[in-house]
Amino acid sequence: MALEVNGARGEVALKVGGVDLVIAATMAGLAAVSTRLECKSLADLFVRLSGVEPAATMAAIELLTVRGDKFAAVAALKLKDFSACSEAFALALGHHFDGEPKNDEAAPAAAE
């Protein structure tokens, strides 16, 4: 049974080894993954997650999961799951870069 996902909060569904998860790229989670992997920049972290480096993938599943059995998912992780992981990580990270819709019409008026 798939878990409920709140896309407005940046949550993303992910199935790993038959285990349903919901991940979110929270700042605390990203900091924990970055620290564990000794990343030197956000770009480094993004490359390691999107490139599905095994250590990065396992750390992200453990530290970015907000619902679901993350330990069962890590134990069941197979190479065939890496594509889905890469897509889910990119979607979760993208939530931070998309931001809120901008009010471009009001921006020039405020600058005057």
Image: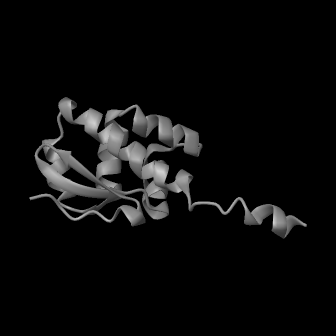
Residue 38 or residue 9, whichever sits in front: 9
Outermost residue, right direction?
A: 112
Residue 20 at x, y percent in the picture = 16, 54
Residue 94 at x, y percent in the picture = 48, 49
In the rendered image, the vertical position of residue 39 relative to residue 83, given as above or below: below
In the rendered image, the vertical position of residue 91 relative to residue 4, given as above or below: above
Q: Residue at x 19, y 47 (%)?
A: 15
Residue 23 or residue 104, whichever sits in front: 104
Residue 54 at x, y percent in the picture = 31, 35
Q: Residue at x 56, y 45 (%)?
A: 42
Residue 107 or residue 46, whichever sits in front: 107
In the rendered image, the vertical position of residue 85 relative to residue 69, given as above or below: above
Left or right: residue 69 versus residue 23 is: left
The part of the image, by quadrant, that contains residue 110 is bottom right
Outermost residue, bottom direction?
A: 110
Q: Classify the position of the N terminus by image quarter.
A: bottom left
Outermost residue, front direction?
A: 105
